[in-house]
């Protein structure tokens, strides 16, 4: 049978507020999420022996196959759908791991889309999102890979009409464990962060059809609450942000997710490409990609 293929786009948190920590230990979040053009590629060979092969320039960062989110999502979907037809996955890995851009989550979401297509399961079948939520916090948003407001622990999604925004993504090739960043934030179970009610009342994202300038004005008032604790764990993140702020034409620069990847937004593709070249020349060991957020 002809192999099926899906693109697993990088997830970028344009803002990320940590509103508190629930009694069960999970953190309540509010995040504006967009997706970039840079991506991994996942293929499924139906009818082949079930398994996963990882290739590509970032393959070595993926760890054990049994721990890969593609494998875990596929296995969980098989437990949910009796007689699920699977096959052999091949992951062409380009996104850095443990980088705050949901690479593994995007891969898992791509696996769910491929399995749904291979089994004629409707995209809006409840079982897809059930598995996504149970397998990883960011996977739900990555299933559709469209701009949204993500709340709760990642399970509540409100679609956004976000205009395309040229960007540069930079990772200094260091990994940051999400659990370590949340630990450094220091919230105890049941603890709310001060000022949460004021923050929620102040949120007013642009209406559908708003311009890039209107969105940038709104996003400039946001923050990533995990940026400071991530910098304490990996101080090089501050160097990345400084490099992004220093390039010509930058409109907004911030860390994504729990780091260490940071992003900058520009007015044009040409400015983003020039900025990527400047940063790449100055820091040849960093992962630098010009793309578009949407």
Image (cartoon, helix red, strand yellow):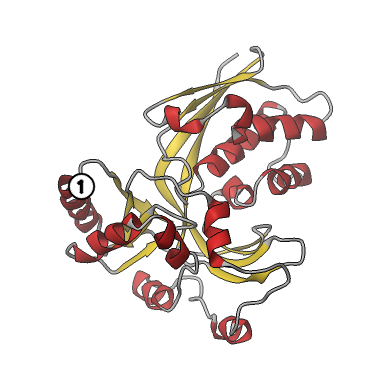
**Residue under the image location 64 percent in, 52 percent down:** 137
**Residue under the image location 66 percent in, 12 percent down:** 49
Q: Is residue 50 above or below residue 11?
A: above
Q: Is residue 120 visible?
A: no
230 left or right of 27 in image: left
Choose top left, top right, bottom left or bottom right for residue 214.
bottom left
Residue position for label 1: 283
Q: At which x and y percent is residue 232?
A: 42, 62
**Residue under the image location 54 percent in, 42 percent down:** 106
172 left or right of 121 in image: left
**Residue under the image location 59 percent in, 48 percent down:** 144
**Which quadrant is the N terminus positioned in?**
top right
Q: At which x and y percent is residue 8?
A: 50, 39
Q: Is residue 261 visible?
A: yes
Q: At which x and y percent is residue 101?
A: 47, 50
- Total labels drawn: 1
């Amino acid at each position: 049978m002809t192999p099926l293929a899906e693109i697993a786009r990088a997830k970028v948190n344009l803002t990320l507020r940590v509103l508190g920590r629930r009694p069960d230990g999970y953190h309540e979040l509010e995040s504006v999420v967009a997706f970039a053009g840079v991506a991994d590629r996942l293929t499924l060979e139906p009818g082949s022996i079930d398994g996963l092969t990882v290739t590509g320039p970032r393959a070595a960062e993926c760890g054990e196959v049994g721990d890969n989110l593609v494998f875990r999502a596929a296995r969980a979907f098989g437990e949910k759908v009796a007689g699920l037809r699977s096959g052999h996955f091949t992951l062409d890995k380009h996104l850095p791991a443990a980088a705050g851009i949901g690479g593994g989550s995007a891969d898992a979401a791509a696996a769910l889309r491929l399995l749904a297509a291979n089994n004629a399961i409707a995209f809006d079948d409840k079982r897809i999102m059930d598995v996504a939520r149970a397998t990883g916090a960011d996977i739900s948003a990555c299933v559709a890979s469209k701009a949204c407001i993500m709340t709760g622990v990642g399970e509540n999604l409100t679609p956004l009409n976000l205009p395309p925004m040229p960007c540069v993504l930079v990772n200094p090739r260091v990994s940051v464990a999400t659990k370590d960043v949340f630990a450094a934030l220091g919230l105890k179970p049941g603890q709310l962060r001060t000022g949460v009610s004021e923050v929620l009342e102040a949120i007013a994202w642009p209406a559908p059809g708003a311009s890039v300038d209107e969105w940038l004005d709104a996003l400039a008032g946001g923050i990533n609450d995990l940026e400071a604790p991530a910098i304490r764990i990996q101080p090089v993140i501050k160097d990345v942000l400084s490099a992004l702020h220093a390039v010509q034409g930058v409109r907004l620069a911030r860390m994504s997710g729990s780091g260490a990847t940071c992003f900058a937004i520009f007015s044009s593709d040409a400015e983003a490409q020039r900025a990527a070249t400047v940063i790449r020349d100055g820091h040849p060991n960093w992962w630098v990609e010009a793309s578009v957020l949407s």
